[in-house]
Image (cartoon, grey):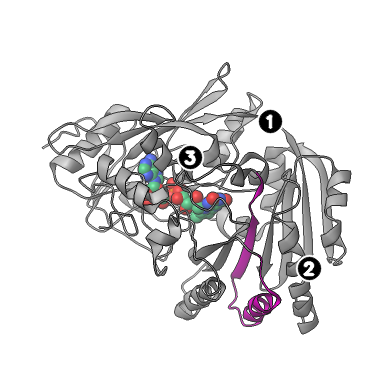
Amino acid sequence: MSSLDGMIVIGPNGIGYNKVRKMFNARFDKFPSLEILPRNDDEAIRAVDFAVKNRMRLRVKSRGRSYEGFDAADGQLMISKVLMKGVKVDSVRKIAQVEAGEVMGDVNKALAKFDRFIPPSALATSMSGNICGGFSYLTRKYGLTIDSLAGVDMVVANNANQLPVLVHANATTNPELFWATQGGGLNVPGFITRLHYRLHPLVNVSTFLLKWTLNSSTNFNKLGQVLGVYQFWGSEVTRDLTSSFAITNTDARAIGMFVGSKEKLRRILQPLLDTQPDIVEIEPPTSIQNAFDRIITQDIWYQTMTMKDQLFFKNTGVFISRVFSSSEIEAIVEQFTVAPSGSFLMLNALGGAVGDRTTAESVYGHRNAKYAIEISNSWEQPVSNRAERIAWVNNLRRSIERTRVKEAYSGWVDLLLEDPDEQYYPTTLERLRRVNEKFDPLDLFGQPQTVQDC
Ligand SMILES: Cc1cc2nc3c(=O)[nH]c(=O)nc-3n(C[C@H](O)[C@H](O)[C@H](O)COP(=O)(O)OP(=O)(O)OC[C@H]3O[C@@H](n4cnc5c(N)ncnc54)[C@H](O)[C@@H]3O)c2cc1C
């Protein structure tokens, strides 16, 4: 038996047990056999060793933002990174060392003091949770969050008879492991304790919100026209601009950030302005932090999800690498005339810098995608039509997938996907399997939908 002496360990009757196991998605409620909260590398090694010696399955949890509650399982060990905090900046090499339990929004606030930033993804999720990819409103200019990763420190257990070890992986040391970490998401074959990022000089950005009201059939007809214009624009426009286009039950909105002036942004927005949105807000350059503070109040995603402590939701996603035909647009619009309350569909524009890298460089396999489309339904209290809401989300995904190569984002895990391995890693699956078998031969880190399924 391995010893956890001096470590923070919480059993089912312990104080704080429910707080640590709490999941963001209230549809899930799981009861781990034990919660271990390591504070440093040594404790992380001992926590993993405890699982090996006691032949226990384990789950790694940081912010608990997994869409399907994968960060905990009944009767399994949970290792929570919530206490692994800290950001160190090497101003000469322009690298930051970030402890795995840090949260994206907090890290960029700390880096602003050094006039630097990491291309953000979710503000509220953990840095290590972002290893699935990470896109947001600066992605077309700076790439995915994983594209700025310079290395990771990870505890791996590749021999049941030896103590787990802390390994470093970067482009030259353990390059296969590093490859798998950049986009591997739930398939990372170890416990990441620290991430090393290349930092970018801070810039100011302009922002915009365009909104079209949807309260009559005329508006819904117009929605098809606006979506038709947006889809040719969002992923082809200058890479200095990253945007999203969301359809909700009551409106459609295009939102984005632009590295440049307000005047230039207005000119670039002309094709969308020509469709005569009901609301037009174009704001002058400000810090990235202020820009996110603005966008948080405008973006349906942030309004619905990010600001909450817990929420019931069913989300899913699909990447598309060719735009919709007019009949496909009609079908989407039709779905919104019957959508349950709390629904949205959001096109997140990709292209630009995302396409500059290849799958030989990272496991993330959706480099050609024009958009990552997210479909969501959420509710704040238990509802009687939960099944109908989940079915609406799933049916819309399937109808979009019907005419395309099916690709899904491993950051938006979905238990209803028909073929998750192929969908998460369309071009990189076999190589990822080999890395996982080498570094996690005990399948210690397996969870639903990992390539070594448990
Ligand atoms: C509110 C919200 C906002 C989001 N916004 C965005 C966004 O803007 N852009 C985007 O790209 N995605 C976004 N996502 C998706 C998000 O990036 C993924 O859900 C991510 O996995 C969440 O990470 P977490 O650490 O917060 O969650 P957790 O549930 O704690 O972890 C998720 C999984 O990551 C793995 N993992 C986490 N830490 C480690 C570690 N140290 N070592 C090994 N494996 C680990 C585990 O397999 C775990 O099951 C968002 C999700 C939510 C719920």
Mark 1 vs 2, N-terminal side: 1
Residue 339 drawn in magenta:
yes
Label 2 vs label 3, nearer the camera: 3
Residue 338 drawn in magenta:
yes
In the image, 308: left or right of 154?
A: right
Q: Which mark is residue 361?
A: 3
Q: Which mark is residue 202?
A: 1
Q: Nearer the viewer, residue 153 or 124?
A: 153
Relative to 302, is 386 above or below? below
Cα–Cα span, label 2 and label 3: 40 Å
Helix, strand or loop at disc 2?
strand
Mark 2 vs 3, N-terminal side: 2
Amino acid type, label 1: Leu
Helix, strand or loop at disc 1?
loop
Q: Position of residue 319 (x, y in %)?
A: 55, 61
Helix, strand or loop at disc 3?
loop
Q: Which mark is residue 212?
A: 2
**For residue 281, what is the image quadrant?**
bottom right
Look at the image and tell me whether residue 150 can be seen. yes
Q: Nearer the viewer, residue 133 or 325?
A: 325
Amino acid type, label 2: Trp
Amino acid type, label 3: Glu
